[in-house]
Amino acid sequence: MFLDEARILVASGRGGNGIVHFRREKYVPRGGPDGGDGGKGGDVIFEADENLSTLTTFRHKKHYRAEDGRSGGGSNKTGASGEDILIRVPCGTLIYDDETGNLIADLVEHGQRIVLCKGGRAGRGNARFATSRNQAPRMAERGEPGQELRLKLELRLIADVGIVGVPNAGKSTLLAAVTNARPKIAPYPFTTLTPNLGVADLDADIQLILADIPGLIEGAHEGLGMGFGFLRHVQRTQVLIHLVDGNSTDPLADFSQINSEIALFDQRLREKPQIVAVNKMDLPSVEEAWPELEEKFKKLGHTPRAISALTHRGLMPLLWAAYHAREQVEELSGEEVPVYRLEEDPQAFEITREPDGAWRVHGKSVERAAAMTYWEYDEAVRRFQKILEKLGIEQALKEAGTRNGDTIRIGEYELEWQD
């Protein structure tokens, strides 16, 4: 089954906890702190794989989580790092943040990788906090929480030439005639429900990758019928072969409809070179109507080509025309599909008042620090208070009007305010 869109949830592993531990050995009454650090959480990594052609893998499995890091041990033993999780996707996959709609990655080449969620930082053991003034620290850090993202995956086929046209124009027949592809072919509309790829050998050294893409209906740019499924794959191609059904009641109206839907979806698609090919010239009625059709297309600024996908008439000249048009187009660059990165200050915070009168502190750094604090150790709590002071949160809470006994919420933790 062909699937070109999927929604999944991915999460990296949490960092392992550092521990509070002191050396226990006979005849060594003051062995000192030897609590080890935790291990790093596993990353979530995406990789483009040319052996995959669909997102069907994500139809049943929608949650992916990397392994958590292990906690540290005594004798300065570092916990094992969590195992990364590698998610393979077809070449041409776009990865979006499903909540914001921003594009995170565009994986085009085989083997191209991106770390989408970094594993949580390992918590430090108490051996790391020993100083000349505090030789027996009773504090450590918990591991940093992992990252979590809801993603939308969208596959856009990568082809040199896209074959477009109304349903039943003969796109699948053309693809089968010029390549080794074997698409489903039948004499009724919408035979092709999924895109097909094929490779055409023009000579010993020149090849063209062609995509037969499902036909359009009016309103496709709004997602009606198979509109989005068609149009997103057109965006990847460099040249379009616009196949016109010569046996249609109004070939020019069909031609105009396809171009209108393409332009309404993405105006830049109109800038792609189009080679117009009038199909089904093996039919006497089409052969008879050809001179008039040729003249009408020329008035629209196109020089049409007469072909028959069934009898292979005019197919090689058509492919060479597509090849030369592709050569004139600049190589597809990453600038065509921009990747958005929102730069945010990790130390930024916001203070709000909740319905029950409690204060809520939002902020990436402070919430992470709270999650990494061992609240059962006084030294760790004092360290967290210094973090609040350093980030300016303590002063901001005072200015907001906090009073003794007020509840302060940071992440999943509740604190009581004391001047």
Image (tube, rainbow, N blue to C red):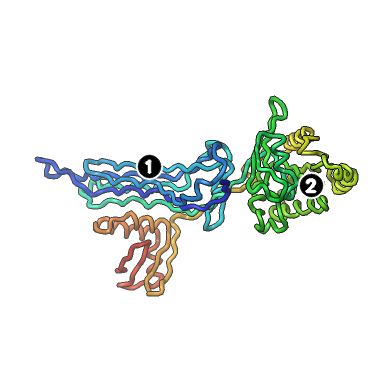
Residue for badge 2: 245
Quote the CA–CA distance across marks 2 and 1: 55 Å
Closer-to-camera residue (58/348): 58
Give the label on residue 316, or none: none
- Amino acid bearing label 1: Glu
| Residue at the farthest top position | 204
Question: Horizontally, is 146 left or right of 70 in the view?
Answer: right
Q: Amino acid at mark 2?
A: Asp
Query: Is residue 58 in view from this perspective?
Result: yes
Could you tell me residue 221's position as x and y percent? 68, 56
Q: What residue is at 57 percent from the left and 37 percent from the top?
A: 109
Is 76 drawn above or below residue 386 in the view shown? above
Residue 341 seen by the camera: no
**Circle 1 — which element?**
loop
Q: Residue at x 66, y 58 (%)?
A: 224
Mark closer to the chain start, 2 or 1: 1
| Quadrant of the frame with the C terminus | bottom left
Residue at (34, 56) in percent of width and height: 371
Task: Provide the secondary structure element on which disc 2 rests.
Answer: strand
Q: Residue furthest bottom?
A: 356
Residue 76 or residue 30, whichever sits in front:
76
How many residues crowd mark 2 within 10 Å: few (<14), some (14–19), many (20+)?
many
Total marks shown come to 2
What residue lies at 53% left-to-right and 55% top-to-bottom?
Answer: 98
Dot 2 and dot 1 residues touching (CB under 8 Å):
no
In the rendering, at what x and y percent does residue 360 appear?
Answer: 40, 67
Q: Is residue 329 left or right of residue 108?
A: right
The residue at which mark 1 appears reads as 83
Quick one: 374 or 63, which is closer to the camera? 63
State the image coordinates of residue 331 (x, y, percent, origin top left): 67, 38
